[in-house]
Image: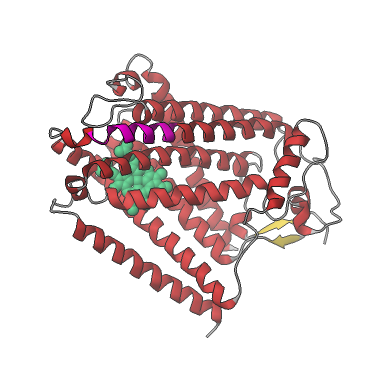
Amino acid sequence: MHTDHVRHIIAAVAAVLVAAGVLVALNAASPGLTTGVWMRETLALVGEGVSQYESMSGNWLILRGLLGVYLTGLVAMVSLLLVLSLRTHPGVNR
Amino acid sequence: MSESTTQVDRFSAVQVYVHFLMALAILVLFLTGTAITFSGHVGWLVAVVGYQNIVLIHIVAGVTLFITLLYFIFYLLTGLATGDVPTAWMPTPGTVREAITYAKHILGRGEEPRPGKYTWIQKSEMLIIAVELTVLTLTGLVLMFPGLLLRYRPSFLVASDLHAVFAFTLLMGVTFHLYDTHVLEFPLDTSVFTGTVSLERAREEWAGWVDDEGTRTDGGETGTDRHIQIAGVVVVLFTFAVIYSGVMIDRILAPVPGTQVTLYLLDAPETILEGSFGLFWGLGLNVAMLVIIAGLVGLLYGITIRVTD
Ligand code: HEM
């Protein structure tokens, strides 16, 4: 058999096995909820008992801040490159 | 054969099909993800498909993406055994020098850079996309099991924050990518579907890749259709403004769930997003949906060229 075929087969089998393994493990770690109940509904469902969040809120604000910096930095950089493309590409290729 | 019809190989079959599957999954994840976060603004999609189905489609596309990425990783790893590992994508000190040359060129000091197979911008895009997809896949897998929320509450909600913010950062990155491949190469850059580009274009864009003498055409046949390009830039900047402000208000500056704490006092994000200026996000998020749908049409058209070739 062609080596490239072997590579495809190994890759496909490994991908499916690893994916299945990860899903089974996560499912086992997740205590009972009927399927079809998703994150947002669950959030609404358990919204009351809030005290455990409070210990997280300091770190959480740092995380939010970092995410905000990442988002802002990336948008600024990409917008700049976009505008500069008006200089580096005078018009479109057809 | 004239230079404009000579083709050079650029992408292997694996690259073509992995790109297709990934892009398809990601565009579907964008459509459904935007409908989950901003369901009020793209209510038509929720009305047509139904909220439960939207989440379900999102998960099916997410698992498809997960398997595709694993497949590609394992395929590359098996290449280690056969000594066939692509290296052209890797950032090197040369990539940094190229970025500096680019900056100098923009400021009018010095020559254009002569990139190899990928320009420094393309290499950065690939790296950022790889990092973002890793975060999105890992957090997405966790969000699939809301039972985890009951047991590991704060961590689960951190995953949800990460998932939403990275999703919309990626959406903006992909919008920029679509500008490169649908506007600068109007109406569609087919190279990632056919696997080849014209020698002429290769010399123009990746002078250091095809040959080192490089006869350059320096914008000879470009320079037409400036208005398409300017319209493209305006549309992209508009979607950036909408998505960026939407995510800042809906996530970054929104209250930490269950506490009164925010980064910046903002108790009810939806009163802004759906209040008197709501039209801005209503219009803008639907423009973003059209951009995603245009990407899907281009993708399906491109892969048809490949299979019917
Ligand atoms: C390009 C990749 C992806 C993008 C752009 C994306 C986008 C989004 C967005 C915008 C949301 C809504 C967040 C919110 O406001 O609550 C979301 C939620 C979600 N995503 Fe993704 N996602 C991606 C990948 C994945 C993957 C790989 C999976 C799973 C394998 C996944 C599973 C989920 C789940 C389970 C939810 C929660 C749905 C709910 O119950 O509300 N996502 N995603």
Height in image: A67 above or below B151? above
In this rendered view, identify the residue nearer to me: B49 or A61.
A61
Is B251 placed left or right of A75 in the picture?
left
Query: Left or right: B206 with respect to A60?
Result: right
Above or below, B167 against B11 in this view is above
Does the magenta portion include B145? Answer: no
Residue that appears at 43% across and 35% down: A66
Q: For the magenta stretch, what is the residue range?
A: A55-68
Magenta span main SS: helix
Residue B130 in view, yes or no: yes
User: Which of B251 and A51 lies nearest the eye of the viewer?
Assistant: A51
User: Within the image, what quadrant is residue B112 found in?
Assistant: top right
Q: Nearer the viewer, residue A20 or A31?
A: A31
Instruction: Pinpoint residue B63: horizontal percent, then vertical percent.
Output: 34, 57
For the point 30% across and 62% down, which residue is it? Answer: A22
**Place of residue B196 in the rendered image (x, y in percent of width and height, measured from the top left):** 67, 59
- Vertical order, B278 against B198 (above or below): above
Question: Residue placed at 19% from the left, 60% from the top?
Answer: A28
